[in-house]
Amino acid sequence: MNDVARLAGVSIKTVSRVVNDEPGVHPSTAERVLAAIDQLGFRRNLSARNLRRGSSTGTIGLVLEDVGNPFYSGVTRAVEEIARLRGRQVISGSSDEDPGRERELALEFCSRRVDGLLIVPAGLQHSYLVPEMRAGTPVVFLDRPAGDVVADTVLVDNIGGTVEAVTHLAAHGHRRIAFLGDAPDIFTANERLRGYREGCVRAGIGYHEELVAMGPHDENSVATTLHRLQNLREPATAIVAGNNRITVHILRALAGSADRPALVGFDDFELADLLSPPVTVIAHDASALGKAATDLLFARLDGDNSPPRRVVLPVRLVPRGSGEVHA
């Protein structure tokens, strides 16, 4: 502002009045100030300005597992669209399933005085957020619940989805249905494993540990697991994949194979409907998850002091061919 005032030949107070749209500045003087601002490339520090006024910083913090995952890209897009309509910008980061990184990102965003936080939790300890929450920063957890704090949470019906997947495969004659899930300490992976067990019981096919492989998984581990499942005394004839990345690994491992098991994946993914055969999935709307969480956050910012809410969004089976292969 000193540089702008010097170039325009006015006081710092006059520059302040111009950039804050305050009255009392002659139009010709305002034009000189604006010309100086343009020439020098001056930009207001909005965060500092808003903090001095004790108001919003105009930002929302978003902590995800992996911004490169198409599912979380859909979540981010929905958050950004609502935030933009409400005059906020979104700053985001990936925890990479590391609780330490999650904490680092969340506290970094808090130090930048974000108006609120949206978190896909990587761990089970979130008491580090209690001081921020007590100070008035609303926090909403999405996709997974917090571990040791009570807060707004938006989830999808993980158990119901895998129950439906197993029931669907059993209806096509499959009795040996395998489940490949993520690391069991991840909430969604554990819930989907519970749904798989329940689905087996409902279908009357029993639950067999030899048909279950929990992660974390990569392309090699999935290929090894499929080889084991296909060489059991009673091989698996169908598979439920616990998330979109595992589904893709399975498809790579099965590429070119003539004897392919039936497959239902949890989470839809791009081009799933164009593969041969197209992939049957348990789908849920990533944008709906992001929207529901962001709506909750803005309700808190608007003064909603009701008890914390737990919202569970529905899922749906999308039959395309890979899950309709008969045993």
Image: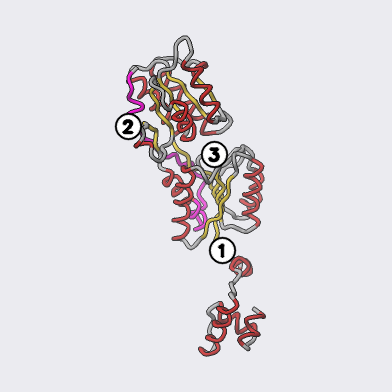
- The range drawn in magenta is 297-326
Viewer-side residue, 189 vs 210: 210
Residue occupied by mark 2: 320
Residue 54 % position (x, y): 61, 66
Q: Quadrant of residue 58?
A: bottom right
Q: Quadrant of residue 36?
A: bottom right
Which one is earlier in the sequence, the residue at label 2 or at label 1? 1
Work out whether 49 lies above or below 299.
below
Residue occupied by mark 1: 56
Residue at (64%, 78%) from the top-left corner?
1
The amino acid type of the residue labelled 1 equals: Ser
Viewer-side residue, 269 vs 77: 269
Count how many numbered circles sit on residues in the image. 3
Residue 17 % position (x, y): 58, 81
Residue at (60%, 84%) from the top-left corner?
14
Work out whether 234 lies above or below 184.
above
